[in-house]
Each structure stands twice: as C-alpha cells, then as structure tokens.
Image: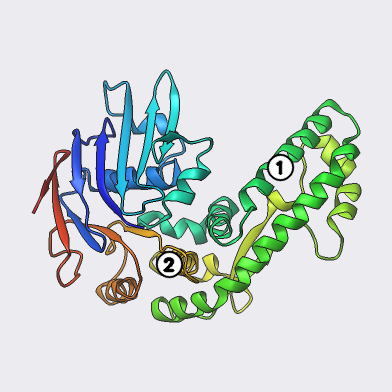
Amino acid sequence: MSLLALEVEGLRCLSKTRLELHPHVNLVAGANGAGKTSILEAIYLLGRGRSFRTRLTERLIAHQADGLRVFGRTDDPTYPTLGFAFDRKEGLRARVAGREAQSLAELSVAFPVQIVDPGIHRLVEEGPAYRRRWLDWGVFHVEPGFVSTWADYSRALKQRNAALKMGSDPGAWEPELVRLGMTLSAARARTMALLEPHWGQTLAALLGEPVTLSYYQGWSQERSLAETLAATRERDLERGSTGSGAHRFDVQLRIDGRSAREVLSRGQQKLLGAALALAMARLAGSEGRRPPTLLLDDPAAELDPEHTQALLAEIRTMRGQLVVTALQPQGAQFATPDRAFHVEHGRVTTL
C-alpha cells in the first residue's frame, strides 16, 4: 500500500495543506523548524494513531486551534481512505474506509508505517518500552489474532492487579493470565525467529558489529509462568501489581556478551536502531504482505558521511513507499526523488 494524498489541518505549525504523494520516493525539504517532521508525524498518525515524538496527542494541536485532523487517500481498494482527528473536548476519533474505527489497531492493519528518526537510538539506549513497541508492531503484522489475544491478556492482568491492590487473593485470574501469556510469548518468539535473516542482512550493511538479539519472555525460563506467579504472589501483593508475565518482556541487544548500549557510540546506536526498524519493516512486508511506508527523518543527523551513505544505500533496497526529509532538495542524497516538496513556515509547496 502507498499513501497517495495527505491532508493536514491544525497540527503543530503546519498550515491547512494537501500533498499528492508518489508511491515511491518522496522528498520533503526545508529549514529546521519549518514543519518537515510534522508532515512525517501526520503520516505516522494515520498508521499508528499516535505520535513518534510525544505520548500526549493534545500537544500536537496548533496554537489557538481546537483540534487537529489528518486525512489520507491510499491505492488500496480495501482501505481507500484513512482519517485521524483529535479534539480538545471530544478526544480522539479514527476512521478506516469511511467508517469509525473500533480501535487504533485498525489503522495499523490498514496502513503499516515504520520510521527512522534522530531518536531511533532510544531503541538501544533506553528501557524496554521502546523495544516492546518495536517487537509487538512486527508480531501484529505477521501473527493473526495477536491483537485480540493481547487485549484479552490486558484485561486479565488488570483484574489481577485490581485484586492485588485490594489485598485479595489474585489466584482466580492466574489461569487465564497464564494461558494468554503463553500464547503471546510463543507468537513473539516465532516472530523473532522469522526476523533473524532480515536482521543479519541489515545489520551487516549498516553496522558490521556482531550484535545478537535475544528474547526475554518476562519471567525466568527455569519456571513456568504459573509457578512464577505463585512464587511471587506475596511480593506482588506488597506492591499491588504483577511483576512477572508476558507484559514484562524485552529484547536484549548484546555484543560479545555485553549490553550494546555500553559498547556503542551514539552514532552507532542510531545505526543499530535503524537496523532494527528496517529489519522489522522487511519482515512485515515479506511473504506477500504489503511493505510498510517508510518515514526517514533527517538521515544525516549524528552520522558521518560514510555511515549516512550506508544507511541510504540500505534504504534504497527496500520495497514500498519512502518519505524522507532533508534541509535542501539535494540533501537526502537520493539520485532523483519521484516527488519533492518544500516546507517554509508551515506552508508546503510542490517542487
């Protein structure tokens, strides 16, 4: 799938605007602060229902505006239109193919989108929350039924945590938590196995370091999840929450047994984060699935020219649509983009 048209209103500094996008390479050029990244943010909202820059959607609304609206038209007859709106009073609304979406997961089904931005190093440097989102996005696209299982698990976890906070016996919720947690863990492990060849290829092209990925399921392999919940019940009662389970998983990145974040520079961490994003995008678009739209924000940030070229060369091998930002029309270092735009003071023009 490709996004063919984008309409944005009330988002950050962007004026009310419309872009006709190309199915392949699109370049968005402009000075820092002009609104380039906000265009990527608008596209990301259509596929994820949230920003990649802030957890608070209200912060995206332009000054003195009551809300924001993003509309997209695609080349997919099943999902020809996408819509995302957030109002200060009415909250969030999403539409897929002209109807109200029941959940934001419907946006991700309709429009897979992945991003490599200057903050991609957080996949390596920071805690497991970023890596959890990274892995579960991939599992969502290769494992049918994953979202509904995760929703059921979340409800069971909420019930167990409620019992813990009340000081009640949480045992009644544990069989369901165990059953669903094992299903989630198995789906994630399968996805990690499928990712391996894509990971090896992308890592070799970008970094050249022997970084290993390992999946931590959220509890010790020496015990079953049922045994773990029983063994940690008293501790969970003390803190009022469930400390082990499928919600506590992580993906560990190591070089010669050491944590990658302890070994790599910031620039190398960015390359490693980009490798994670690109490898997962390859997996999501493999075996007849639709390749995701790839957003590339300021690829030269914190990279030397050699590694910038390596990143761009790897991206050129990707299938699907690309939207890339740069300071100058020639700054993205692609030979000739299929379509180019210029952003200045929040206004977008086609070059």
Query: In terms of secondary structure, where does tag 2 sit?
Result: helix
Label 1: how many residues lie within 10 Å, few (<14), some (14-19) or many (20+)?
Answer: some
- Amino acid under label 1? Asp
Q: CA distance from mark 1 to mark 2?
A: 30 Å
Label 2: how many residues lie within 10 Å, few (<14), some (14-19) or many (20+)?
Answer: many
Indicate whether 184 appears above or below 207: above
Q: Which residue is mark 2?
A: 278
Between 139 and 252, the one lying in front of the other is 139
In the rendered image, the quadrant that contains the C terminus is bottom left
Quadrant in the picture for residue 173: top right
**In the orientation shown, which residue stands out farthest toward the top?**
89
- Mark positioned earlier in the residue sequence (1 or 2): 1
**x 33%, y 71%: residue:** 315
User: Disc 1 vs disc 2: which is toward the camera?
Assistant: 1
Percent across and percent down for residue 64 are: 26, 20
Indicate whether 320 appears above or below 305: above
Indicate whether 169 appears above or below 129: above
Query: In terms of secondary structure, where does tag 1 sit?
Result: helix
**x 53%, y 58%: residue:** 141
**x 41%, y 42%: residue:** 51
- Amino acid under label 2? Leu
Image-based side of 324 in relation to 136, left or right: left
**x 78%, y 30%: residue:** 162
Between 253 and 316, the one lying in front of the other is 316
Q: How is the image coloured?
A: rainbow
Q: Which residue is mark 1?
A: 152
Image-based side of 314 in relation to 13, left or right: right
